[in-house]
Image (spheres, rainbow, N blue to C red):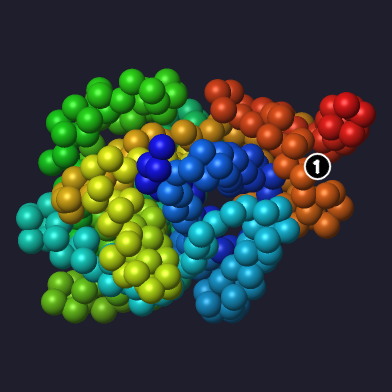
């Protein structure tokens, strides 16, 4: 065997406690897969980290009157504690705050800019007339134009999973003040996703082992037409724009949807440096025989099955995903587990009360691989007592 297997696991926002839906959706399946591959004799690199620049962090910081760094410092150690308590066997679980991550992000930005697939353009963005500031995607809520869900976010609808632009929302409102935002002209750097449509479609057509819902979702995005997307926002928190491209005026940062997925590559490079073999990352990223598996929830399909591959194609000389085994949702008594909405207890709450193998068994027995799975605490207890202990 001796294959090189990259296990790339979704980066959680360091903005609050994670729940069992996160564990079942990405982290436990990835760990089971990585442990199997190691037992089989393959060379496994399993990486992830806390996404420290997501707007949920700045939203929470604004609500509490603290800095985003204080929110990260509170929740990143908590998340690390989950993996230690449950034996999730990361080779590296880092953050997007490192100098290494910034440099890798800048490198990808520069390559795309050199090739003309990152361009400067002017667009309309929502502006809060009461707070007198531009509103990044998650600072805007409204009604989803596709499914009618009334609490859709400016970047994605939690109900139907469609990616959105804030200006698509019906009856938009600012999360800062509740005011109806107005559109104002602003200039940003844009990734020309449209330039990669044909290449992404050809690549997707070759994927014969992917889960049907993942491949169909990705192809559906191609069919609708890939929009060119702004990769910077009017923010004070985030990775700065490379100095030579910082021509847009003050208060601009690289936006999280562009830089967070780069974490898989930057984490591999960070791991290699820690091992004292700084070029070892190439065995998983530039070896044509290496395989890469991205464990995410289904709401992350657009970013991992379309946008990140497009970024890699434009960057060049790096492997595209072998598979994106995105899981469906875990619901709790019929409601989707949601960190932002407080549905579902934290992983830590269960880890304090159940032995790790017992909890892992109960969750592994109901992984939402093809359909949403409903979960109750009574069912967790039943599976442990009747299926694990009694048998």
99 or 198: which is nearer to us? 99
160 or 22: which is nearer to us? 22
Quarter of the picture containing the N terminus is top left
Q: Looking at the image, which residue is at 51% across and 59% down? A: 91
Q: Looking at the image, which residue is at 45% across and 44% down? A: 42
The answer to whether residue 234 is above or below residue 348 is below
The answer to whether residue 235 is above or below residue 250 is above
| Residue 169 visible in rendering | no
Residue beneath disc 1? 358
Q: Is 212 on the left or on the right of 280, as rendered?
A: right
Q: Is 164 on the left or on the right of 82, as rendered?
A: left
Secondary structure beneath label 1: helix
Q: Is 364 on the left or on the right of 62, as rendered?
A: right
Q: Looking at the image, which residue is at 32% across and 70% down? A: 278
The answer to whether residue 352 is above or below residue 102 is above
Q: Where is residue 59 shown, x and y percent of the image? A: 53, 64
The answer to whether residue 127 is above or below residue 62 is above
| Residue 374 visible in rendering | yes
Total numbered labels: 1
Q: Where is residue 14 shown, x and y percent of the image? A: 56, 63
Mark 1, Cα crowd under 10 Å, few <14 / some 14-19 / many 20+, is some
Q: Where is residue 352 shown, x and y percent of the image? A: 83, 57
Q: Where is residue 36 shown, x and y percent of the image? A: 56, 39
Quarter of the picture containing the C terminus is top right
Q: Looking at the image, which residue is at 63% across and 64% down? A: 80
87 or 150: which is nearer to us? 87
């Amino acid at each position: 065997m001796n294959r090189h297997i990259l296990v790339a696991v979704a980066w959680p926002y360091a903005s609050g406690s994670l729940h069992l839906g996160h564990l079942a959706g990405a982290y436990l399946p990835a760990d089971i897969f990585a442990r199997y591959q190691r037992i089989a004799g393959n060379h496994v690199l399993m990486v992830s980290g806390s996404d420290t620049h997501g707007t949920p962090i700045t939203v929470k910081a604004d609500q509490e009157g603290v800095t985003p760094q204080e929110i990260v410092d509170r929740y990143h150690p908590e998340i690390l504690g989950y993996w230690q308590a449950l034996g999730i066997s990361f080779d590296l679980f880092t953050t997007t705050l490192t100098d290494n991550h910034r440099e890798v992000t800048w490198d990808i930005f520069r390559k795309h800019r050199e090739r003309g697939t990152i361009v400067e353009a002017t667009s309309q963005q929502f502006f809060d007339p009461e707070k007198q500031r531009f509103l990044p995607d998650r600072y805007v809520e409204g009604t989803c134009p596709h499914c009618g869900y009334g609490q859709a976010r400016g970047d994605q609808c939690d109900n139907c999973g469609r990616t959105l632009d804030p200006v698509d929302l019906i009856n938009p409102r600012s999360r800062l003040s509740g005011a109806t935002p107005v559109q104002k002209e602003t200039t940003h750097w844009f990734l020309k996703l449209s330039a990669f449509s044909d290449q992404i479609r050809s690549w997707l057509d070759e994927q014969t082992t992917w889960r049907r819902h993942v491949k169909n979702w990705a192809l559906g995005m191609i069919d609708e037409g890939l929009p060119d997307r702004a990769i910077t926002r009017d923010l004070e928190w985030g990775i700065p724009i490379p100095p030579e491209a910082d021509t847009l005026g003050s208060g601009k940062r690289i936006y999280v949807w562009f830089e967070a997925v780069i974490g898989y590559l930057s984490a591999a490079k960070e791991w290699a440096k820690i091992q004292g073999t700084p070029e070892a990352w190439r065995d998983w990223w530039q070896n044509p025989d290496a395989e890469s598996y991205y464990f995410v929830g289904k709401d992350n399909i657009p970013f991992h099955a379309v946008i990140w591959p497009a970024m890699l194609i434009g960057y060049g000389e790096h492997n595209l995903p072998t598979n994106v085994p995105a899981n469906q949702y875990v619901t709790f008594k019929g409601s989707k587990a949601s960190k932002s909405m407080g549905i579902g207890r934290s992983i830590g709450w269960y880890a304090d009360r159940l032995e790790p193998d017992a909890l892992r068994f109960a969750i592994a027995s109901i992984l939402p691989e093809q359909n949403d799975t409903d979960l109750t605490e009574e069912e967790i207890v039943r599976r442990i007592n009747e299926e694990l202990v009694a048998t």
